[in-house]
Amino acid sequence: MIRVEHLYLSPGHNYFGHHGREPDEHPMLAVPEVECVAGRGLRGDRFFDYKPDYKGQITFFAGELHDELCVLLQTWDRDPSVFRRNVITRGVDLNTLIGVEFEIQGVRFLGSAECSPCYWMDRAFAPGAEAALKGRGGLRAKILTDGLLRVDARS
């Protein structure tokens, strides 16, 4: 069972495409539900209609990993939104969904790749975050069917 713990949208990119300059300050907006649009992304998010067949139409991050990083890096004041992923989950190893079709709350997805962590993670969360996230930075996925995802629902 995959639990949706948090949902986030952002109107703009803070780190993506910002190598060599300061990040922007677009907020991650916590929302109770998101509209998934097949082949396009999340309505209202920075990656909506980003480019055809984009592998990161929606992104996922494990809430259990956020908890682990808080302990490991002794950082208690960072919300999981700092990772800039759309969906914070509980109850699934996201890496097992790479290359797999899966369903949450009646919406179908195709896990396309890991969200590889970058040097910005050390700034966004805490020094050491990039290294700690290697091989488990979250999941990029394509949206296969239209539908709504809601916080706290189980699939």
Image (cartoon, rainbow, N blue to C red):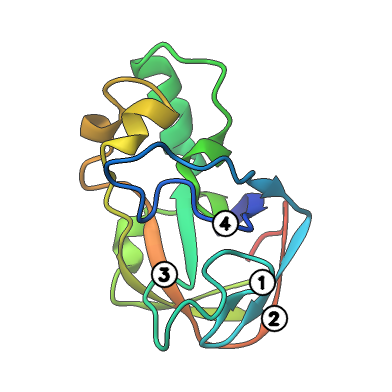
Q: Position of residue 102 (x, y in %)?
A: 46, 76
Mark 2 Cα-neighbour bin, 10 Å: few <14, some 14–19, many ≥20: some
Residue hosting label 4: 12
Spatial separation of the CA atoms under disc 1 and disc 4? 27 Å
Disc number placed over residue 147 in the picture, else none: 2
Label 2 close to label 1 by CB (< 8 Å): yes
Q: Find residue 12 and report its image quarter.
A: bottom right
Instruction: Name the N-terminal-most of marks 4 and 3.
Output: 4
Mark 1 Cα-neighbour bin, 10 Å: few <14, some 14–19, many ≥20: some
Residue hosting label 1: 105
Point 44% across, 54% down: residue: 92
Q: Position of residue 137 (x, y in %)?
A: 33, 47
Q: In the displayed structure, would residue 4 be above or below residue 104?
A: above
Q: Amino acid at mark 3?
A: Gly
Q: Amino acid at mark 1?
A: Gln
Mark in the foreground, 3 or 1: 3
Q: Find residue 141 and report its image quarter.
A: bottom left
Spatial separation of the CA atoms under disc 2 and disc 4? 23 Å
Instruction: Name the N-terminal-most of marks 2 and 4.
Output: 4
Q: In the displayed structure, would residue 49 be above or below residue 115?
A: below
Residue 144 as seen in the image, left or right of residue 141: right
Instruction: Name the N-terminal-most of marks 2 and 1.
Output: 1
Spatial separation of the CA atoms under disc 3 and disc 1? 19 Å
Q: Label 1's element? A: loop
Instruction: Name the N-terminal-most of marks 1 and 4.
Output: 4
Residue hosting label 3: 56
Q: Is residue 17 visible?
A: yes
Q: Amino acid at mark 4?
A: Gly
Mark in the foreground, 1 or 4: 4
Q: Label 3's element? A: loop
User: Seen from this angle, which residue lies furthest top?
Assistant: 74
Q: Label 2's element? A: strand
